[in-house]
Every structure is written in structure tokens, then in C-alpha cells.
Amino acid sequence: MIVYKIPISMVTSEEFAIVSARISPETQDKLERYLHYLNEREPGLNVKMSTAVRMLIVRGLDQLEKEIGPLPPVPRSKR
């Protein structure tokens, strides 16, 4: 069973950055299979592709930080 933490105040779409990427057909197939898996596992949840991708990015970054430690902050540009 998947448990989701829902914040008290819902986050609006304006609070998210839009990221675009080119992916291989094989990666797209894996994403579609993961999306199908989520929706089959949790009937009624109706997860969208964008949500599944966000979940995988967060999971991947969390795993990366477990392996290599916290990522350093991005340097500020000189003004």
C-alpha cells in the first residue's frame, strides 16, 4: 500500500518549476508501465504521468543523497 502525505495547505501548480526532457522510447515505456502499476495497485487513485514522474525524480534524488551524501547548494551567480 502506498501512503501519501498531504500537506495542510495544498500546493498550487504555480509553485512548481516546469522541466522538459527528451527521453528514449524505452524510458517512456518504463514510465507508462510504472504509471499503469500505480493505478492498478491503488484503484481510484488515478495517478497522472506528471505525478508519477515527480515521484520517481524525488525517489531517485533521495536515493542518490543516501549514496553520496547531501548535494551541495548551487552557487549564486555574481551580479
Image (cartoon, rainbow, N blue to C red):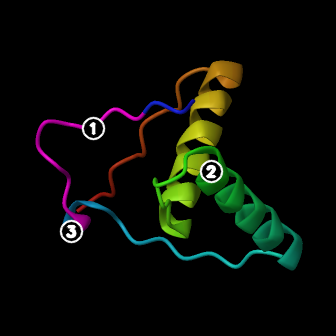
Residue pictured at 27% horizontal, 37% vertical: 6
Judging from the image, what secondary structure is the residue with disc 1 in? loop
Question: How many numbered badges does the structure rendering display?
Answer: 3
Judge from the rendering whether residue 19 lies leftward or rightward of residue 22; answer left or right. left
> Considering the image in quadrants, where does the C terminus appear?
bottom left
Q: Tell which circle, 1 or 3, labels the residue nearer the N-terminal end.
A: 1
Residue 16 left/right relative to 70: left
Q: Please name which of the two marks, 3 or 2, marks the residue nearer to the observer.
A: 2
Q: Nearer the viewer, mark 2 or mark 1?
A: 2
Q: Residues within 10 Å of mark 1 (few under 14, many from 20)?
A: few
**Magenta stretch bounds:** 4-13
Q: Is residue 49 magenta?
A: no
Q: Is residue 11 magenta?
A: yes
Instruction: From the image, tell me which residue sits under label 3.
Output: 14
Q: To which residue does mark 2 refer?
A: 38
Q: For the residue carrying disc 2, how many other residues have a C-alpha within 10 Å: few (<14), some (14-19), or many (20+)?
A: some
Q: Secondary structure at mark 2?
A: helix
Identify the disc placed on residue 77: none
Give the residue type that dot 2 points to: Leu
Residue 6 is tagged as 1
Q: Nearer the viewer, residue 17 or 77?
A: 17
Query: Where in the figure is residue 33, as x and y percent of width and height?
Result: 77, 61
**Distance from label 3 to label 2 (Cα)?**
25 Å
Disc nearest the viewer among 1 and 3: 1
